[in-house]
Image: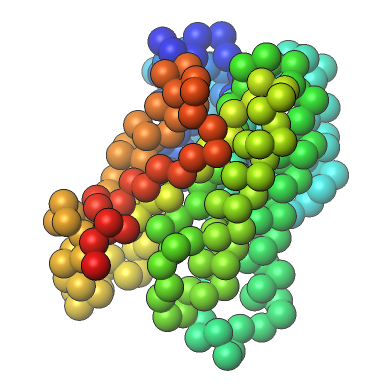
Amino acid sequence: MRFQDRIALVTGAGAGIGKAIAASLAAEGAHVYVTDVDGEAAADTASEIEALAGSAEAHGLDVTVPAAIVALAARIAARHRRLDILVNNAGINVRADFRHLTDEDWEQLSGVNIDGVVRLSRDCFELLRSSGRASILNLASILASRGTRQAVAYSATKGAVAALTRGLAVEYAHFGIRVNYLAPGFIETALTDRALKNPGIAKALIEQTPLRRFGTVEDVAKAALFLLSDDAAFITGAGLAVDGGMAAGL
């Protein structure tokens, strides 16, 4: 119960990695604000948490809408006066050769993957400072440091998340707020489903992964809970790869 009575906010928690992190936090005692652009998916996650005697509430949240973030922060302030954990997990991908990337594609990607992280980390600052031992965890990607075709823009946004994390870790340390990021490899989620179900692509990716398997959302959630917990009290500005060793290989 490392998170007993702590208040957590997880974005993109309607499915996949965000859902696994939200459920794991609740299982260890946190009250979790489960948010997702798909409000029904967020409600399903919250219901599943409550069915297991966890504490959660669902909120539809589009991280590209500044007013929605401000409103949710105000709600948390009114009820709890603090926020102990912020997990910026919401993310999307638009696969396209870079020469064909449209302005709309870029605005959509950057709006969710980096602007949303910026706004939540900024607009929840006072709540996080009130905690006294708050932790922010941002979800980057192995592609923040590896290039691949048709994901150049995605890589750029995730590289920005890594850089933002390092900067915030330095700036927020004075206020007792730690900031770290995870860099997942190829995890079995809806975001990677198309690639992992292609036999040729899947075989090539497995051959680049020393542990010879794809990751699960539970693998990522376990790493997330470590960085968010007091077990990592002297860790800030760090990135942890959860990729089966892919980043360490040639």
Relative vertical location of residue 50 with respect to residue 12 in this rendering, above or below: above
In the visual, does 232 lie left or right of 218? right
Closer to the camera in the image, 46 or 180: 180
In the visual, does 137 lie left or right of 83? left
Closer to the camera in the image, 190 or 187: 187
Residue drawn at x 40%, y 58% is 142
Q: Please say whether residue 137 is visible from this viewpoint.
A: no
Quadrant where the C terminus sits is: bottom left
Residue 95: give x, y in percent of width and height: 49, 76
Q: Please say whether residue 134 is visible from this viewpoint.
A: yes
The residue sitting at the bottom extreme is 99
Relative vertical location of residue 196 with respect to residue 136 in this rendering, above or below: below
Residue 117: give x, y in percent of width and height: 66, 47
Relative vertical location of residue 110 with respect to residue 100 in this rendering, above or below: above
Q: How is the image coloured?
A: rainbow
Q: Quadrant of residue 99?
A: bottom right
Quadrant where the N terminus sits is: top left
Q: Quadrant of residue 61?
A: top right
In the visual, does 243 lie left or right of 38? left
